[in-house]
Amino acid sequence: MFSRCESFRAFSLGKGAIYMVSAFSAANGVVLGQVKTAEKSNEITAIPELLKLLNLQGCLVTIDAMGCQKEIATQVLQKGADYLLSVKENQPALADAFEAAFPMAKVVNFEGDAYVTDEKNRGRQETRYHIVSEVNEEFQELSYEWPGLKTVGVVMSFRQEGDEVPEAPMIRYYISSAELSAKKLAEAARQHWFVENKLHWSLDVALREDACKIHRGHAAGNLARVRHIALNYLKGEARFKGGIRRKQKKTALDETYLADILAV
């Protein structure tokens, strides 16, 4: 499970973007809950409100760097779950510790638990190095500040498009309260970004969220919730082998199928 902030534009005079912080189950492909916030910067306050709504016992909760906060980590643990938080410059002490402990050469030639993946897709090749470590000397003092911290991890990605010059490597840092293997980190990090395909793409392409011009009152936020509910129903029906758009069309033409969708 993870939370992520998405935005869409309210098309009215004086209205900016509306942001919805959503919790998405990577295992089931459905939205578990959402909270509206006026600005993306308010994601820090919206995530705790969203976590209150959810039963997270036994889950691994992954959150973007905006949610890498001690209070949020504590709340996740109090809900009976483990956290996997992305680390960026908004937590400078953590970021500095990662840079000191894991220079690029050490990541590529790591002697501990490591897992490497190679993928080719439409002419693009991407190699990812995943490494995990217990809390070591560079993180010792920080471990007292971050509740339940057990694992630190690094993902380094090398990407090349066809015969072009390889892109500069991209490095992502993670902290977790779970005892993760490098393979488990790879799976969790990849599932976190599935939201782009499983949620945002479906909302934008199938349900045309970005093209919606309805904005009066609470309409934009309410419609966002309705879209998520509809998407959950459509994804939950597995007997008809078709995409979301085909399922939408079938529900419009076949009342029996519509009843089946609503009974999921």
Image (cartoon, rainbow, N blue to C red):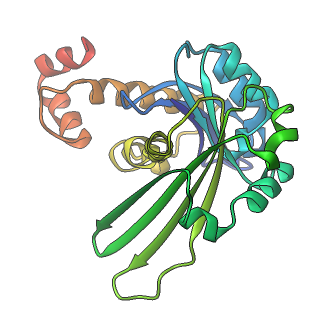
Whether residue 234 can be seen here: yes
164 shown above or below 5: below
For the point 73% across and 20% down, which residue is it? Answer: 75
* 173 sits left or right of 97 in the view: left
Who is closer to the viewer here, 223 or 34?
34
Q: Position of residue 55 (x, y in %)?
A: 55, 12
Q: Position of residue 69 (x, y in %)?
A: 78, 36
Who is closer to the viewer here, 261 or 132?
132
84 shown above or below 101: above
Q: How many marks?
A: 0
Q: Position of residue 159 (x, y in %)?
A: 45, 72
189 shown above or below 125: above
Q: Position of residue 155 (x, y in %)?
A: 56, 56
Q: Quadrant of the C terminus?
A: top left
For the point 45% across and 43% down, which residue is it? Answer: 195
Who is closer to the viewer here, 221 or 148?
148
Whether residue 9 can be seen here: no
As drawn, which residue projects farthest toward the front? 111
Quadrant of the rendered image containing residue 161 = bottom left
* 238 sits left or right of 141 in the view: left
For the point 58% across and 15% down, which residue is it? Answer: 54
For the point 19% across and 20% down, which residue is it? Answer: 258
